[in-house]
């Protein structure tokens, strides 16, 4: 199994980067619910980190069980600065899923900066915020596309969630956050079984769509919802 490392973070840190931020999103493929992004930067006090069970477990979220991801969620929050961006189904339908994914990434970066400002005491938080604004930083983006219209240094890394520890951490936070949101949606729309498929187009989900038609949180611009809406179901 591929293990992610801090090799790239160490490289950029040695080159003078104060903040090395991994960013990833989950939720491009589902038929319902939001797309969620996370920006994660390992805390200076933990860098360079030593190996350990939890550190070693931080890898591509898709290779972890739900139980493992939940366990790592708090560990990552304790050892990384974290920001989360959530873009809902209505925006996805209005501007398309790719643009919504980029918007979620920008929202996560803004949230990261807000969290830096509120971290610890107000004085230390303001110092961190100032440091974030003025120091050199780089965004390590999972995938082959950089975030458009963003005036920050970036590097796009295909399959980055498999190789780069900060991106792996971001993938776990984003996945757990989205899964929790879909569990809330299951309580509201139990007939679709969002607790089982989290909005992805599984056989069960397609059967429920055929039976009940789309609900409020389904992405109406996606198939089969667009056709079902057109037929008035």
Image (cartoon, rainbow, N blue to C red):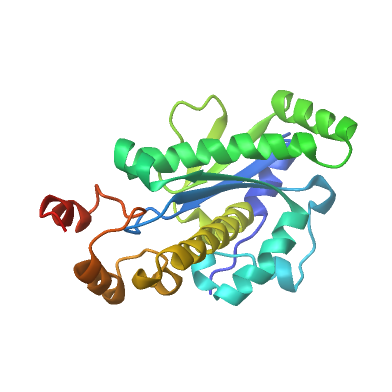
Front residue of this view, candidates 8 and 78: 78
Quadrant of the image occupied by residue 94: top left
Name which residue lies at 79% across and 51% down: 47
Q: Is residue 184 above or below residue 108?
A: below
Q: Is residue 48 above or below residue 204?
A: above
Front residue of this view, candidates 124 and 50: 124
On the rendered structure, is 217 left or right of 206? Answer: right
How many tags in the picture?
Answer: 0
Q: Could you say where residue 44 lies in the image, as x and y percent from the top left?
A: 80, 45
Name which residue lies at 87% across and 33% down: 122
Q: Could you say where residue 153 lies in the image, as x and y percent from the top left?
A: 57, 30
On the rendered structure, is 222 left or right of 15? Answer: left
Name which residue lies at 54% across and 24% down: 151
Tell which residue pokes out farthest to the left in this image.
Answer: 231
Q: Could you say where residue 65 lies in the image, as x and y percent from the top left?
A: 55, 76
Front residue of this view, candidates 150 and 165: 150
On the rendered structure, is 41 left or right of 221? Answer: right
Residue 180 visible here: yes
Front residue of this view, candidates 163 and 33: 33
- Quarter in which the C terminus is drawn: bottom left
Residue 155 visible here: no
Q: Could you say where residue 159 lies in the image, as x and y percent from the top left?
A: 46, 56
Quadrant of the image occupied by residue 93: top left
């Amino acid at each position: 199994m591929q293990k992610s490392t801090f090799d790239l973070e160490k490289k950029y840190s040695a080159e003078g980067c104060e903040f090395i931020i991994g960013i990833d999103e989950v939720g491009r493929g589902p038929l319902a619910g939001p797309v969620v992004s996370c920006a994660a930067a390992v805390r200076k006090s933990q860098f360079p980190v030593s190996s350990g069970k939890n550190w070693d477990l931080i890898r591509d979220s898709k290779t972890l069980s739900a139980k493992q991801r939940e366990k790592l969620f708090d560990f990552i929050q304790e050892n990384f600065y974290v920001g989360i961006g959530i873009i809902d189904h209505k925006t996805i339908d209005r501007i398309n899923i790719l643009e919504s994914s980029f918007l979620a990434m920008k929202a996560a970066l803004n949230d990261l900066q807000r969290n830096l400002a509120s971290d610890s005491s107000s004085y230390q938080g303001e110092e961190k915020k100032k440091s974030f604004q003025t120091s050199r930083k780089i965004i390590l983006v999972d995938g082959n596309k950089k975030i458009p219209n963003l005036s920050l240094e970036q590097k796009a890394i295909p399959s980055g969630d498999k190789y780069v520890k900060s991106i792996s951490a971001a993938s776990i936070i984003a996945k757990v956050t989205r899964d929790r949101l879909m569990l809330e949606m299951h309580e509201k729309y139990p007939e679709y079984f969002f607790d089982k498929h989290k909005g992805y187009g599984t056989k069960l989900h397609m059967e429920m769509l055929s039976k009940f038609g789309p609900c409020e949180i389904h992405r109406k611009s996606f198939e089969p919802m667009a056709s079902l809406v057109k037929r008035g179901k």
